[in-house]
Image (cartoon, coloured by chain):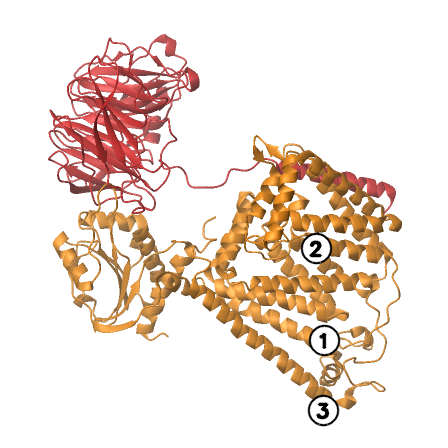
Amino acid sequence: MPGMNSGVNVNDPIVVAAFKSALLHQGLIALLIFAVLGLAWISVRAWLPTSSPAGEQPGLGGPPAPAVAEPAWRQVLRIGFGLIWVFDGILQAQPKMAIGLPSQVIEPLAAASPRWVQHIVNWAGTTWSFHPMQAGASAVWIQVGIGIWMLAASHGPLSRLAGLASVAWGLVVWVFGEAFGSIFAPGLTWLFGAPGAVLIYCVAGALIALPERMWDSHRLGRAIMAGLGLFLIGMAVLQAWPGRGFWQGLASGKPGTLAGMTTAMAQTPQPGFLSAWISAFTTFDEAHGFAVNLFAVVVLTVIGAVFLSGQRRLVRPALIAFTVLCLAAWVLVEDCGFFGGLGTDPNSMIPFVLLATGGYLALTPGPVMAAKPATAAEPAQEPAAAGWRDRVQPAFVRRSVATASFRSVAAVGAVGLIILGAAPMAAAQASPIADPILAESINGSSAPLNFRAPAFSLTDQHGRTVTLASLHGKVVLLTFLDDTCSVDCPLIAQEFRQAGQLLSADTQRVELVAINYNPLNTQVSYIQAFDRQEGMAAVPNWLYLTGTSAQLQQVWRRYGVAPAEILPAGSMVGHGDYAFVIDQAGHLRRELGFDTGPGTQATKSSFAAELTGAAQQLLGHS
Amino acid sequence: MSRPARLAATALAVAAAALIAGCSSAASPAPGPAPEAPPGGEPFLATSMVTATGTWAVAVMGGSVASHNNFWQLFERPAGSPDWKLVTPPGTPDNGGLVLADAGGPSLITAFRPSQYLTYTPLALTRDGGQAWASAGPLDGALANVPDALTAAPGTGRLLALLTSGRAEIATPGYTRWNTLASQPALAATRAGRRCGLHDLTAAAFSPAGVPLLAGTCSRPGTVGIFAVTNGTWQAAGPSLPATLARQAITVVRLTRTANGTVALLKAGSGPAASLLAAWLPGGGRNWAVSPPLKLRGATLSSAFFGPTGAAGVVLNRNRAETITGAGAGWRSLPALPAGTATLTPGPSGGFDALAVHGTRLTVWQLGTGSPSWHTTQAINVPIQFGSSG
C-alpha cells in the first residue's frame, strides 16, 4: 500500500515527544473550554436567577417539569458505549499511536482485503502519515469528546445528536481504521471480531439517536434481538463453512485458523496470566479443533435462533449464555482487544454484550423509572410552538443557559472537545505537504550557519558553465546526487522536485542545484539520463552540475561532504546525503542532514516541506 | 416479526453468510513488487562468454535473486591462465544484473540492468581484460532481462540493445546517442513477424557480417523467430525445424555470434514435454544445422553458454548439465554438477569449469577432459557490501 506508512520508527523520540506535547497543549485547551463553560454557566445562573420559569428551583436539575424517563435499554447503550468511546480515546493517546496507527493497525488489517479496499484505506493512511501528530491528537479528542457527550446528554436533541456523532465517527473508523471490519478479507469470523467492533458502536449510536416516541416500543426490542439473532446465525454458517481452516486444530502440522490466530495473540506483550490462558486454549484447540468449532457453531446457532424468536423467557438464559460466550472469546481469542500490539479498542465482544443487553431490556418491560428533571437539552419541555426563530431570541437563549443542567454544559464542552480535535486535523489536511517533523525525526534539526559558501564552476545538464557567483541574488538549495545511485538520490531528487513545485511562485528567486556525487560516471549524458528518469526537466529552476572527477572532488572537499567512496563488488558509490541552504548573498545558512530514511511519500513530502520552509525563510515569507 | 418473515430473514442471513464465506475463503495474493529476475529455473543472466583474450562469467552472489542484497559479479579468466579473478566494474549498483557484450579484442562492454529506482542502463567499457573500466553510455532505458540483451558488432563496435519496453536500440561507439532499430510491435507487423506471430523479443545479436539479428517467441507453432534486417527490411532468418516439432511453440532462449558463425539455443514446447535444441549458422552460410532435441523431462534451465567454436552447454536444475560440441553431435551429460553451480564455462585446457556460489564465496570446480568427477581449483571470497544498495 503505497504511502500509508510514513516508515518512521513508531518509538521515534522526536515524534513521540511532539505527540505528547500536542496532547498536553490540547488537553489544557480542553480544560479551559470546560472551565470557561462552567464559569459562564455559574455566572449566568447567578445573574439571571429570575429567568427560570416560575416555581423552578435553581440548581443542577433545571426545570422541575417531569421529562420522559430514559428507558433502561437506552441508558445501558448510552453509558456503555460512552465509556467505550472514552476508553478508545485514551488508547489513542498511546505514544506509539501517532506513527504506528497506519503501519501497525490499519495496514495489517487491510493487507488481506481486496485491492479496492486497500485503495480506500490507503487514502486515509496516507493522510494520517502526512500529519501524524494532528491525526493522532484529533482521534483522541474526537473519541473522548463523543464518549463524554454520550455520557452527559441523556435526553433531548443533544443526546440524540451524540448518537448520530457516534454513528458518523464510527463509520469513519470502521471504513478507514478497520478496513470495513475486514469483512471482505478471508478468514472472517465472529470470534475474531467480525463485522468490526466499531460497526456495533454505529448500531448503538443509531439506537441512541432514535426519537423519544420510539423509546417505549416493544417492537424495538424485538427488532434489535431479531437483527442480532440473524447476524449470529449468519456467523454460525460462516463458522461452519468448510475449507476455511476452523474445523482443524492442526492442519498438516500447522495450527488451524483459530489456533493460528490465538498462537499469534499469545505471543504479543501482555500480562503473563493472560498469555498462559490463551496458550492453554490454543493447545486445547489444536487437540480438539473440530469439537471447539462445533461448539461455536451450535452455540451461535442456538443463541441466534432464540434471539430471533423474541421469546422473553428464552432470551434471558440465552443472553446469559451469550454473555459468557462473549467474555470467553474476548479473553481467549481476542486477547481483550487491546493487549496485543497497538490496541485501539476492546474489540467486539463487550459491545456485543452491551447491544444484546440493551435489546433484552428493550424487549422486557422494566421498572418504571423515576422521571428526571429536564434540562435545556430537552426541548420537550419548551413550548411546542417554539420554532427556531424563537430559539435564537436572546431571551430564549438566556433562559436556556440559565436553566441548563450540569450535564448539558458537559455535553456542550464535549462538543467543544470534538471541535478541538477535528479543527487542527482539518487545517492540516488542507495542506498537501507532510509535517516537517518527519524529516527532523530522521536527521535531527540543523543549527543556523552564516559563512560564505564555497565557490564552484561546473557544467549543467545543458552543457553550460554554472558558477555559484552566477546564482547570486537567489536562494540556492544545494545537494549532491550520484547519477547512478539507485535509492537515495532518486528520492532526494523527488524531494527537490516537490520543493520546486511548492516554490513555483518564486522560481526566479530560488535555484535548486545538485552536484554530481559520482567520480566515475561524470558525463553530461549521465546527468541528463538521471534528469529524464526523475522528470526534472519539468522543474524550471533545476540545475544538475557535473565536471571532471578532479573538479567534483574539489567541490566535495570544499563543502566538507564525505568523499565518494568507490566500493567493490557491484555496490553503488558510497556517499552521504546532504542539503545546503545558501542565501541571496552567497552565504551558507543551513546544512541539513538529508538521509532519506524510509523514503515514503510522507517523508519525501516532509523533506520537501523542510527545504521549502528554509527557502521561504530567506525569502522573507515566514 | 411474523414467523414467515423470520424464516425468510433467517434464510437470507444464511445465504449472505454463505456468499461471504464463498467470497472470502481463498486468500488473495498479496500485492507486491514484481520480481527483479525471472523465477529460478528460467534462463537468466548467469552465463559465460569466451572472447579473444579470456573467458568471462557472470553470477549472482550474496542474497537471493529477488532481494536487494544480491550483487551480480563478473569474473574473468585470462586466456592461458587457470585462475579466475573478480573484475566487476565499480561505481554502479548492479543488483539488477550484468549483461556482457564482446566488443572485440580485449574490449568488453558491461551493462548494468537498472534496479530499484534506477530506470536507465549504465554501461562500462574495459579495454584491458577488466583491469580498468571507463564509463560509457548510458542507455536511456531498462535493458531486457535476458543474457543476449546487449551485443556489439564486429569491427564497427556498434551496440545493439534490447529493452524491457520491447524496443531494440542501436548506437555507435561513445554510446550516448541511441536510435530505435525496431520494436516488437513493429517487427510483429512485418510480413516475417506476422508469419511467426511474434509476441516478444528475447535476444539480439550481430551476424559475423555485422547484420543486426533479433529473436523472440513465435505464437505460430514450429516457427523459429529469428529475424535479420537487410536493406531496411526485416526477414525471417531462423532455421527450419524437424516435422516432429511442428506443433511446438518455439522460443529463442539464446542467440549469439561465435568465431565460426551464429549460434542459437531454442526451447520447443513447454512443461514436462519441453525440449532444447542448439542451432548453428556458419559464417557466410545460409542453412542452419539443428541439434537433436534435448528432452527436459520437467527440468528447468538456469544457465546456458557457448564455447568459442559453437559448442553449447546448459545448466539444469538438480545439478544437471548437458553439452553439445557442435552441428552433427549429440547432447552429452556431464557428471553431477557441484552444489551451487551458477554457470559453466569451457575449461582452460579442454573440459569445463563450474562456478559455484555460496553466499559471498565463489568456488571454481574443474572437470578435465574425460575426467569422471569435478575437483576444486580455486575459491574467491567476494567483498560484498551488504546493505549498500538496499
Identified at 62% across, 61% down, the residue is A88
Residue B242 lies in quadrant: top left
Q: Earlier in the sequence, mark 1 or mark 3?
A: 3
Identified at 14% across, 59% down, the residue is A554
Label 1: how many residues lie within 10 Å, few (<14), some (14-19) or many (20+)? many
Is there CB contact under 8 Å for labels 3 and 2? Answer: no
Helix, strand or loop under label 3? helix
Is there CB contact under 8 Å for labels 1 and 2? Answer: no
Label 3: how many residues lie within 10 Å, few (<14), some (14-19) or many (20+)? few
Q: Quadrant of the C terminus of chain A?
A: bottom left
| 3 vs 2, front mark | 2
Give the amino acid type for the residue marked by disc 2 in the picture. Ile
Work out whether A354 lies above or below A332.
below
Give coordinates of residue A95: x percent, y percent: 51, 63
Q: Earlier in the sequence, mark 1 or mark 2?
A: 2
Q: Tell me the subunit letter for badge 3.
A: A
Residue highlighted by disc 1: A408
Q: Is residue A46 left or right of residue B232?
A: right
Q: Tell me the subunit letter for badge 2.
A: A
Give the amino acid type for the residue marked by disc 3 in the picture. Trp
Residue A47's mark? 3
Name the foreground residue: B152 vs A243. Answer: A243
Chain in orange (letter)? A
Chain in red (letter)? B
Marks 3 and 2, Cα distance to the nearest angstrom?
46 Å
Work out whether A399 lies above or below A526.
below
Give the amino acid type for the residue marked by disc 1 in the picture. Ser
Name the foreground residue: B227 vs A405. Answer: A405
Marks 1 and 3, Cα distance to the nearest angstrom?
19 Å
Give coordinates of residue A546: x percent, y percent: 18, 54
